[in-house]
Amino acid sequence: MKYVDRDLSWLSFNGRILQEIGSKDVPLMERLKFVAIYSSNLEEFYKVRVASHRFAQKYKGDKRNKYGYRPSYILQQINSIVSEQQSCLGRLFFDEIVAGLAHEGILFLCGDINKNDQELIGKYYDAHFKDEFKLIEITNETTLDLNNQSIYQLVVDGGKQYLLEMDYERWGRFITLEQTEQHIKIVQADDIFRYNIHKILGHDTEVYAFKISRDAELYIDEEQDENIVKKIKKSLKKRDTGLPCRLLFNENIPFKHINTLRKKLDLDMSSLIAGGTYHNYYDFFGFPVFEDKPHLYYKTDAKLPCKRLDNSTDWYQTVADKDVFLSYPYQSFDYVTDFLKLAAEDEAVEEISTTLYRVSKGSEVGLALERAAQSGKNVFVLSEVLARFDEESNIYWGERLEQAGAVVKYGIDKLKVHAKVFLIKRRENGVLKSYAYLGTGNLNEKTARIYADHGILTCDDRYTNDLDEVFKFLKDEQYEPHFKHLLVAPFVLRKKLTKAIHRSITKAKAGKEQLLHIKLNSLEDPEMIDLIREAADAGVKFQMVVRGISCFCPLSKAQRENVKIVSVIDKYLEHTRIYHLSEKETYLASADWMTRNLSSRIEIAFPIWDADVQNMLLQQISYQSNDRLKGRVITPEGDNAFVEGSNKLTSQEYMFELVTNL
């Protein structure tokens, strides 16, 4: 095949998360957090990607996708890979993490629990859970209307079957049974039920956990004569009742029982995924925190200062003097939100325009925009209401900002707005002067604590004039924008990237050494992959850092030798996109090289002209490409072999030095 399928490549990425779970160099509680990340990733993968394959297989026929694979084949491969990964996860969890916690005096009681601890569980049940567990008998006539992602216990007592939904919100999942100076004993609500079911039914009762995952796609009725917000709200209500796409069950359950569930849920055999006794490992995000054991966690990094802003008494003048480069989470995102707050309360500011893609419920950005609108400023907000799993939050802030007096637009017809920018217009000496922010990550102060991104505050009219064109289009889709410096998708981004790579091909054929440095979250677009192949065959070298999906498959010796792709998985989520296309052409961007980003989204790549920042970005890619501690070489085989090298620090640790020296 010419390409690696995107979903099989993504499973390889989640396999790299598994490697962090198994790494003894990662603090123990952080390994547990990676368990939660792995599980959360996989849950979304089933709700979105696997569901889409099942939908295509059922309603569109078993047709090949753009990579040349049929849904039936992909689903078969997914089943096989996930089953193997789940076995590995279970082994790491019980043999290393649970055992490691016990060594620290944190006794997480799970699996086979001894009689003394069973007695403790029994006493806790009698004191706190008696009469809490309500069983529903399953008969031939029973229709199963199961909640998405909820854990259920199937209880078998002789010839009868019962169902119990685990209500973690009400009971909690992780419950402290006992705490002394020497140890703390923690148990899951599942086991409180499991070890006391005999008090409800009998001693020969069997208990098996299972859950379903449902299709999370929003199927919006385009024929309805309603605005997009109403359509989204209606669709969101259906998300929890979407078609089941996976039935995850305790591997010890007799087949006859799981087959009964499968039939009642109208699932085929490929939907069955065997797991362990416990599910929803992403709940470990809520595992108790042990502040008296700091060695079990990553060291808390002090935020690096932005000296130019910290030493400034006039941020506008500082930004006007020279662009301010920022890097998160090495520096605080507060610099961005504080600049917006400053503009919101500044009487000289007349207009603020921004895009919002993923917004937290308590968003500082949202609050600043609200204050600006309430004070009478012209505030325009493009709220992308189709940002998956953030639809409710974006609608919430959109409606709240509308009430404050802002003009809010919910997306663009047939285009998602993924750019991360704002534009401020301030009257100075009778003239409107523009200030802007352009970034690679969302305007979200919470994710900025764990996502590694870059951004700039600027007054340079080469940025602001083009950004003004972007917002004119966002406000009026009939407007034809023109750009001189920003590479904006879907208008010019793909075309400019193609032209730049063709330029390198011409130079390489003329005998000039060509090395392109590219950093992305995903490399998926077949056209860009074909272009990389053409360039590599001509002698152009690519040093690429791709965190997640990579569909690149070398088809020649030159392609294997000239294209190096590395993925870095570490403490922070690598999220920055960097395109270094020539000695004088470096861009930061919101766009990955995926078909959707280049052809069906509003994305912005913005040039970096400052030589020091350019050099820092190149060093970042170089450090990551040679990171033997956290870097994995990406190949079509997906074996995730670590990079060969001699570095003693991780590339993220080196980043502190790079950002400090700017």
Image (tube, rainbow, N blue to C red):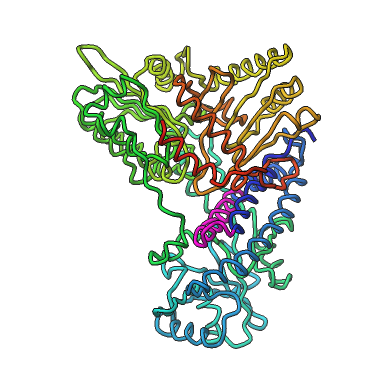
Q: How many marks?
A: 0
Identify the residue at horizontal 46%, vertical 29% (top origin). Answer: 419
Q: 649 or 344, which lies in front? A: 649
The image quadrant that residue 499 belongs to is: top right
**Residue 611, percent across and down?**
46, 21
| Residue 81 located left or right of residue 367 | right
User: Relative to 132, does residue 557 appear above or below in the rendering?
Assistant: above
Q: Nearer the viewer, residue 432 or 248?
A: 432
Q: Position of residue 588 (x, y in %)?
A: 50, 27
Q: Which residue is painted at 50% across and 75% down in the image?
A: 107
Residue 282 can be seen, yes or no: yes
In this rendering, the answer to whether 40 lies above or below 319 is below
Q: Which residues are magenta?
A: 24-46
Q: Is residue 488 left or right of residue 524?
A: left
Q: Position of residue 271 (x, y in %)?
A: 69, 56
Between 262 and 458, the one lying in front of the other is 458
Closer to us: 642 or 497? 642
Q: Confirm whether the magenta stretch covers residue 205.
A: no
Image quadrant where residue 20 sits: bottom right
Say above or below: 269 vs 615: below
Q: Quadrant of the N terminus?
A: top right
Tell me: residue 351, above or below residue 658.
above
Q: Quadrant of the C terminus?
A: top left
The residue at the point 31 percent across, 25 percent down is 352
Asked if residue 39 is among those painted magenta in the image, a careful observer would answer yes
Q: Main secondary structure of the magenta part?
A: helix
Q: Is residue 148 visible?
A: no
What percent of the width, then of the height, locates residue 487?
51, 19
